[in-house]
Image (cartoon, rainbow, N blue to C red):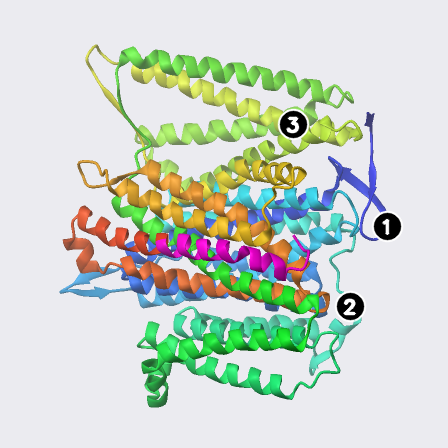
Amino acid sequence: MTADVINATTGDGKDYKTLWGHPIGLYVCFATELWERFSFYGMKYLLLLYLTKYHLFTDENGLSIVGAYAGLVYALPLVGGLLADRYLGMRKAVIFGGILLVMGHLLMAVEGTKATMVAGEVIRDNFAINVFYLALALIVLGVGFLKPNISTIVGKLYHEDDPRRDSGFTIFYQGINIGSFVATIICAWLGETYGWSYGFGAAGLGMLIGLVTFLWGQKYLYGHAEPNNPKVLKESFLGPVNKEWGIYIVSTLSLILVWFLVQKIAIVFFTQNLFLLMSVVGLTYYAMFYKNEDQNRGLAKIFATVIVLFGLMAVIGFTIDHFPDSMLSHVALFNQFETWIEPLAYVLLGMIIAFSIYGFLKTSGESYSRMIVLMFLIVSTIVFWALFEQSASSMTLFADRVVDRRLINAQLTNGDAWIFYVLAVLSFAVAGFGFKTANAYRRIHNSPLKSVLMPTVLIGLIDIVLVLGVVIYQFGGEWITYFSYLGIFLLLLTSVVKAMSLAFILIGFFFNRDKATTVTKTDATSSAASISIIAVTMLIVGAICAYYGLVHLGGLADGQVENLVIEPTAGQFGSLNALFIFTLAPLFAALWVKLARVNLDPNTPVKFSLGLIQVGLGFGALLIGALTPNEAGKVAWVWLMLAYLLHTTGELSLSPVGLSAVTKLSIKSVVSMVMGVWFLATSLSEVVAVLLAKIAALDQQELLTLTVSEQLDKYNDLWTTLLYLGVGFGLVLLLLSPLLKKGMKGIH
């Protein structure tokens, strides 16, 4: 079934042009979020390495900065989403957030002078470090405005009951994974190989492309992202300054506070714990009297107040215990709380359990029971994410220091040239098949040949320019380095376009297989162009293989050897999570559907427990790998890959069903607040993650004196702890799952 143009009804009932059955606005959001995630993940796996290797921070101090930053990144979207809902609207919030992100990521490229060790003391460029903190503050604030609102825009493009809604979000989240994968590969490689400013600069360029993409494509949002009440923004905030500019000005001034907080992880930790405790107690109290207004609330209020007061003392004690040099430790009374931490913790836990039981005595409503289960599940996610987020902290340092990262370490002779000739022939065959398929799509509507050739030729020329640049540099043409940032820009552009082309090929393939769909001229041309871009890429890959076999290996004399070593950087291993999500998510979705058909689909608590067990077993894989180190004492990279695989399968078991559980188990009138508690728990888990990572923290002296085997022993202590935490909590949750399932009152 074909047609030249297909219109589809979106959220306001009007008809708009589509691509593969979805509003074009979806692909604008797809591309914007792809580049935002590119910039975020592009610097995420560089951050700790940059602090410890360039500015010579100890592991402990570097982890504190990373933890405070990550904790704030997951907390600020609550504020950004609220301001967009009530005042700015999503479009303006995304643009403001995008501007802040571009500024922050580009400031990250300011390296300053490399730190040096003089007479046992580290001498650092304090100005550059303060600029670095400002860059982090800009990124935190930018993510706060952009991230929650770009997702909301996607939802606004569809009716609530639109059958395309779920697949639209699936396409959108694939953009996140593409951005994460490509960014970690490129930015980590540039930063660790050519200089930190190149890696961070590439992330900044990526966000700039994302902002330009959104500005260009905002016309395809058709007003869905505008303020609910534009007149409010024009009202006076302070004298001649209206409320819209008031928000921008106050947000900009808040950078001072965020700049301070990224350096003070103890304050972030204290605030997260206190707000999480108050939220859990408050929601429990609310659910206790939901549709139960005639009950006396006096004792419940006293109970809740006492819990919060005991919780405040416990949180102060916890904070001083984990951060002895925090501001709180300067108060004598607060130090007393630290000495009482164990009994305070037990009393607090007992009081929360007693308060929950008291609620069951006050009400028999299903809403209360479901809310208690949901609060328990949300708190359990802190353990999961604290283990999962070791990826950008301890696992990255582990990969840098004690992992043999060589994927290929071969000695080749002229007799091995045939291998590359075979690879070349296979690449040419795939390219030929691709061009043939692309032409078949083009001919569905007899689209102009130039509509397919132009993007294909452009990407092909960019690839050729990049290859020539590398060849010129290898043959001594250092003048080419003057065009480094142009080369980085072209590399980003061609890499992301290819990744998007692969995604679009899959989207188009499944869309075209559906007999009920109508393939428009735009659909067919887009599919043809995407396939053609991949085909020309395979053509260039084939040419490189043929060149290597003919010139490099074919030119070797008999008995002469050439080493071929492919060794990713430590940060590049972080791309495995996005790669596994991209490939395994469809399989997991199909698995749950298939199990549901035979009534074997695990309920939500069981899926949570499976996620915890798998993330724990990932560290078990690292422990097994440590049993068979190579002659240098390093662990084979395959064990790190297995750990990432298990962590990703754990994430696919827990994360999607977790967000779904929030919407299904929460009382509808407070679902937004409960979603906020979910992200607050995630924010806290980022700080808990670095506290755990500090078990294997090394200082500069230890890095110089400890052997690889001795460093490995410290990491094994950490992996053992995390293995027990993940598997232990997972098994406890599995044992409690029948009780939790009963408490869900029929919700699966």
Q: Which mark is residue 421?
A: none
> Depth-wise, is mark 3 or mark 1 nearer the camera?
1
Q: Residue at x 53, y 14 (%)?
A: 429
Q: Residue at x 30, y 31 (%)?
A: 476
Of mark 3 and mark 1, the one earlier in the sequence is 1
Judging by the rendered image, the residue that carries numbered circle 3 is 529
The answer to which of 300 and 236 lies nearer the viewer is 300
| Whole-percent x, y for residue 297 in the image | 66, 85
Indicate whether 667 appears above or below 434.
below
**Quarter of the image that includes the N terminus:** top right
Q: Kindly identify the amino acid type of the residue bearing the numbered disc 2.
A: Pro
The answer to which of 731 and 274 lies nearer the viewer is 731
Judging by the rendered image, the residue that carries numbered circle 2 is 230
Range of residues picked out in magenta: 724-748
Dot 1 alpha-carbon crowd within 10 angstroms: few under 14, some 14 to 19, many 20 or more: few
Judging by the rendered image, the residue that carries numbered circle 1 is 13
